[in-house]
Amino acid sequence: MDWGLAQGIGTKVLLAGAGGLLLYWTISAVRLVLSARGINPLIKQFFTQVASGRVDAAYLLTTKNYRSHVNRQQFLRFLASLQLNKYNNLKSGRPRLQEGQVILTVKLKAENKDELPLDFTFTKVDDAWRVERISKVAAA
């Protein structure tokens, strides 16, 4: 086989592979963005409820599964342990898909540059997103 022909075929295979990978990444990214619509308003609603003292309303934004594992008192203790009143801003990261759920890291920020990263796991219940899990992100 001629070296030029082999090199030409190799280049075309490499370009086709790169194109396929780019197409797969684009489809995955679009799918993730479309499936995660509605999560940011839910996070805003959750923290607005907590900040205004309507903790029961925030608790009801969680799934039945969450409420079966975390009772209201545990939820209150968890929120108290976060010391949320120190933070005045939040920034959400990139959503990640895992087993039909969306995981989103939210960083709460204080004026003194302190950050509190929290992982929120969301699941769809009757076409609406609900909080399935909330956990502190371990420091790296």
Image (cartoon, rainbow, N blue to C red):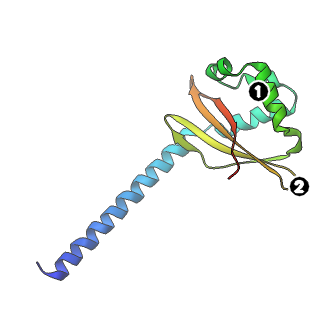
Tell me residue 54's x, y (percent).
Answer: 84, 25
Q: Residues within 10 Å of mark 2 (few under 14, many from 20)?
A: few
Q: Residues within 10 Å of mark 1 (few under 14, many from 20)?
A: many
The quarter in which the N terminus is drawn is: bottom left
Work out whether 93 lies above or below 56.
Answer: below
Residue at left 89%, top 39%? 85
Q: Amino acid at mark 2?
A: Asn
Tell me residue 47's x, y (percent).
Answer: 79, 35
* Rendering quarter of residue 7: bottom left
Q: Amino acid at mark 1?
A: Ala
Query: What label sits on residue 58 in the rendered view?
Result: 1
**42 on left or right of 11:** right
Provide the residue designation for mark 2.
Answer: 112
Tell me residue 90's x, y (percent).
Answer: 77, 47
Residue at left 84%, top 56%? 113
Most foreground residue, 17 or 37: 17
